[in-house]
Image: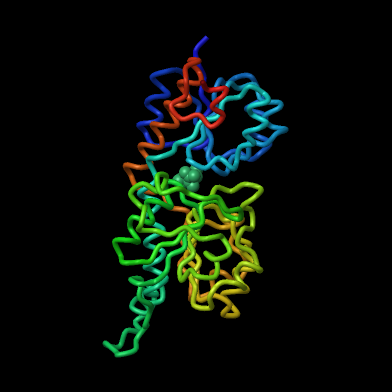
């Protein structure tokens, strides 16, 4: 019988073509709700399902699913209960590596955009309120010499560090917040002597820009809560290109409103696409619609990788990028 792939949302053509070359492909016309997705996965009609971040693949869905694998069109896989998938012998794949630089670019863009008040400045020009150069019009902050604190020190954090060092920032990191773990000079590689490891607590207190680069897990949900925001500098800016729920968004809105911290640059939100009331009205924010990986080459490559994972699952071969590697090996 021909292999049958279920694609919950159309992905770029290079990925779809690989799937079509390997079997039959059903692309849903619109993103499925949870019940529809669960029914499709349980139907026995599909070998592999190619999912997006908004497709919740939780334990009950996976227990009833009659698919061999789930290929996520993302590096993050917090939408999938990987332990449950492993228990049910369902393989999970993701798309690491290809989006590292693009996402670090967006982190840097948010650092620069918040520091130099780009949204306020753009709006002033568009609204016809630019009445000529003024010595104190929209004064921002210097990025060079400022302390960038990286929460996490994986691929995207390192790529952000590389950019920040080029801008003359003083880069600190805490590798696994809220816990601490020592990173040896060997592990630091090219960054040895250029960036400094501190505890999570120090990072919170010393950063002018605190940038989040952790996966969403039970340990990192609401990592930045009211308590953390209170311990940040009043002039600090929070940058989030990781996952929205890593920040307690209501506490952030309150902190921005009351001046507990100075600003925020966010590419992700706690309950996407909803925003916590009050967030959009705050001038000291730059808000982006989850576009960290949104370049044409990167999305094409993510499509290719997710398709290669899906085809490997369907054909019983080792996945190029397995999340539950014991099953994938
Ligand atoms: C994706 C992302 O575009 O890869 C990730 O983890 O957050 C983004 O690059 C998004 O998840 C689409 O599913």
Q: Nearer the viewer, residue 197 or 166?
A: 197
Task: Please identify the quarter of the rendering in which residue 108 is found.
Answer: bottom left
Tell whether 132 sits left or right of 244. left
Residue 4 at x, y = what percent? 52, 19
Count of numbered circles on the image = 0
Q: Please, is residue 247 above or below residue 59 in the view?
A: below
Tell whether 79 sits left or right of 16. right
Q: Nearer the viewer, residue 132 or 143?
A: 143
Residue 254 at x, y = what percent? 63, 73
Task: Please identify the quarter of the rendering in which residue 281 is found.
Answer: bottom right
Colouring method of the image: rainbow
Q: Please, is residue 318 above or below residue 76 in the view?
A: above
Q: Residue at x 72, y 33 (%)?
A: 60
Q: Residue at x 40, y 37 (%)?
A: 302
Residue 200 at x, y = what percent? 56, 60
Q: Nearer the viewer, residue 133 or 81?
A: 81
Task: Please identify the quarter of the rendering in which residue 89 is found.
Answer: top right
Tell whether 143 sits left or right of 230. left
Q: Can residue 293 be seen in the rendering of this structure?
A: no
Residue 54 at x, y = what percent? 57, 44
Q: Can residue 32 be seen in the rendering of this structure?
A: yes
Q: Nearer the viewer, residue 75 or 41?
A: 75
Q: Residue at x 57, y 24 (%)?
A: 326
Q: Residue at x 64, y 58 (%)?
A: 222
């Amino acid at each position: 019988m021909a292999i049958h792939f279920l694609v919950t949302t159309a992905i770029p053509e290079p990925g779809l073509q690989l799937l079509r070359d390997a079997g039959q492909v059903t692309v849903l016309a619109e993103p499925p709700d949870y019940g529809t997705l669960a029914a499709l996965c349980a139907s026995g009609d599909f070998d592999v399902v190619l999912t997006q971040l908004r497709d919740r693949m939780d334990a009950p869905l996976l227990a009833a699913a009659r698919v061999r694998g789930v290929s996520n069109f993302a590096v993050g896989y917090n939408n999938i209960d990987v332990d449950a998938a492993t228990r049910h012998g369902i393989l999970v794949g993701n798309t690491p590596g290809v989006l590292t630089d693009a996402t670090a670019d967006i982190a840097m863009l948010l650092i620069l955009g918040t520091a130099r008040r780009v949204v306020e400045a753009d709006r002033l020009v568009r609204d016809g309120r630019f009445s000529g150069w003024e010595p104190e019009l929209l004064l921002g902050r210097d990025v060079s010499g400022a302390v960038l604190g990286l929460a996490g020190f994986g691929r995207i954090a390192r790529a952000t560090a590389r950019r920040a060092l080029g801008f003359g920032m003083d880069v600190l990191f805490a590798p696994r917040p809220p816990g601490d773990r020592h990173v040896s000079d060997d592990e630091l590689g090219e960054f040895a002597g250029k960036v400094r490891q501190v505890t999570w607590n120090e990072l919170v207190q010393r950063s002018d820009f605190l940038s989040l680069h952790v996966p969403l897990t039970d340990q990192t949900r609401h990592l930045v809560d009211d308590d953390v925001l209170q311990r940040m500098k009043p002039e600090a800016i929070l940058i989030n290109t990781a996952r929205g729920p890593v920040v307690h968004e209501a506490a952030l809105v309150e902190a921005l409103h009351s001046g507990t911290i100075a600003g925020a640059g966010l590419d992700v939100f706690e309950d996407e696409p909803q925003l916590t009331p009050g967030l959009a009205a705050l001038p000291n924010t730059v808000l982006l619609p989850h576009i960290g990986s949104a370049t044409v080459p990167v999305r094409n490559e993510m499509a290719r990788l997710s398709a290669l994972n899906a085809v490997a699952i369907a054909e019983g071969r080792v996945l190029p990028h397995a999340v539950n590697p014991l099953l994938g090996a």
